[in-house]
Amino acid sequence: MIPLFIEALTKRLRRDLPGKSAQRKMMITPNRFPKENQENEGIPASILLLLYPLEGKWFFFLTKRSQNVEHHKGQISFPGGVVEKNESKMNAAIRETNEEIGVDKDVIKIIGSLTPFYIPVSNFHISPYVGWTEEKPHTKVQDAEVKRVFSVSINELVLEK
């Protein structure tokens, strides 16, 4: 049985998303938003926002990147990385989540994607995916790329009105 939250989120991801206009609002310096042709030239990469239920709340994973990686040393990020040759962007998000934090590929259910975006400093064109698992999955940090994995509750991020 699919939880109500996942069902509602799946339906919402199938509708039009605010995309670029929402991304511009969230940028620190909106005037530096890249032109479309720059995005198409970026290195294809994917990330996964992996949701899981725990004690009646929904959580997702973030990582603190190690100092050993080429790009974004020490930064907080979603699991993800470069799309390999002949690999789909969605499969790259799942593979990278497995490689970086050890989540079994077979327990991940993809429910949709978000609007892709470009990161000028590393020249990555990121395709974000949203997935879920039925319970908190076992994790195992791949310490060459990830210093730490931690969970964030969606409830903590929602602003109360």
Image: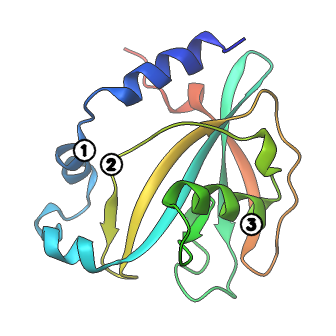
Instruction: Tell me, yes or no, if residue 78 can be seen here.
Output: no
Q: Is mark 3 on a helix, strand or loop?
A: helix
Q: In this view, does 17 lie above or below 129?
A: above
Could you tell me residue 32's position as x and y percent?
16, 71
What is the CA distance from the residue labelled 2 to the residue labelled 3? 23 Å
Which residue is at 80% across, 44% downward?
106
Q: How far apart are marks 1 and 2 (CA)?
A: 5 Å
Marks 3/1: CA distance? 27 Å
Report crowding for label 2: few under 14, some 14 to 19, many 20 or more residues within 10 A (C-alpha).
Answer: some
Q: Name the residue under label 2.
A: 115
Q: Mark 3 points at which residue?
A: 100
Disc 1 element: helix
Of the residues shown, which amino acid type is indicated by label 1?
Gly
- Mark 1 = which residue? 19
Residue type at mark 2: give it.
Thr
Q: Where, quadrant-wise, is the N terminus in this rendering?
A: top right
**Residue 52 location in percent, x, y?**
71, 32
Label 1, residues with CA under 10 Å away: few <14, some 14-19, many ≥20:
few
* Residue at 42% over, 72% down: 44
The answer to whether any part of residue 69 appears in the image is yes
Q: Can you say which quadrant of the picture contains the C terminus?
A: top left
99 left or right of 22? right
**Quick check: marks 1 and 2 in contact, CB under 8 Å?**
yes
The x, y position of residue 57, in whole percent, is 69, 21
Q: In this view, does 36 lie above or below 52?
A: below
Q: Pick whichever of labels 1 and 2 is earlier in the sequence.
A: 1
